[in-house]
Image: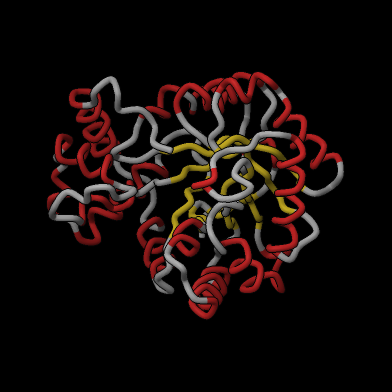
Amino acid sequence: MEKRVLGRTGMNVSVLGFGGSEIGFQNASEETVRTLLNTALDLGLNAIDTAECYPGSEDLIGRAVAHRRNEFHLFTKVGHEHGLSAGEDWSADSITRTIDRSLTRLRTDRVDLVQLHSCGVDVLKRGEAIDALRRARDAGKTRFIGYSGDDAPARWAVESGHFDTLQTSLSIADQQAIDLTLPLARERNMGVIIKRPIANAAWRDRERPKGAYHETYWLRLQDLDYGFTRAAGEEAASTALRFTLSQPGVHTMIVGTQNPTRWAENARLVARGPLDAETLRAIRERWKSVAKPDWVGQV
């Protein structure tokens, strides 16, 4: 699998990474995760991203691949010590406890990247959370620190110069970052990790998925009405993934799944390479002509 250097971190990462959200929220079995991740590692995966608030995800990943720790780069996130439903906690004490707990769950003595998980500009400006990440880095618990989020807070994080990486949303249904953050991140040699790069394959639902995680993308895609999403199937997924990967400054895309064969299938689609210039231009022009002012990056 193609690899790209993750900005100034120097980490050589596979362009298709693994996101640990779905295995946590969908209560994947330990056997499923072990098969999925070990198969993906054998095929070239070397970037795994998770968070302390994805229920069970860190534990599952640790049990599945801790014995292969030197074969991949490991990323996690902080800010929700007691889970998403319990709200945020950006205090230094909470962040420090969370990082220590993540190391235990992941069965490692260090991660490669710890990220603040979608906090607001007010939290970033106070500086306590950033200082806590710096202390963790100084203590050898993480090699690098980053910000995961979208819209104005993501822009602030890039402009601040405090972070090594930015994780942000970008897809055929979520293109704000192409203008808002990617050019500056590229200028500053930040590593860029893309979440939700396939727009949760929202086009697959024939009816509106009310209340679902991808409902916003489904609604946007109705207005965007790309021809390739109407056709669906493998071509839609390939075009969507390759559109995201073709954007300047993108280093890796994080895709979650609990299907043991899905990562390999996506890797095969990504291996087709960048989209041709005409298709890229058509998708961007459609977005610019249809997107509404409130179509901001989706957390």
- Residue at image location 53% in from the left, 55% down from the top: 54
In the displayed structure, would residue 294 be above or below residue 219? above
From the top left corner, tell me how far across and down residue 220 is, in percent.
22, 37
Residue 175 vertical placement versus 15 (above, below): above
Instruction: Please provide percent x and percent y for residue 128.
Output: 73, 27
Q: Is residue 243 left or right of residue 25?
A: left
For the point 52% across and 27% down, the residue is 154
Position of residue 143 measured from the top left corner of the image (x, y, whole percent): 76, 45
Residue closest to the eye, 271 or 251: 251
Residue 81 located left or right of residue 290: right
Q: Identify which residue is drawn at 56% across, 22% down.
A: 121
Figure quadrant of the C terminus: top left
Name, please, the residue furthest toward the front.
86
Q: Is residue 266 visible?
A: yes
- Which residue: 75% across, 35% down? 92
Residue 102 placement: quadrant:
bottom right
Q: Position of residue 68 (x, y in %)?
A: 69, 71
In this view, the residue farthest toward the right is: 139
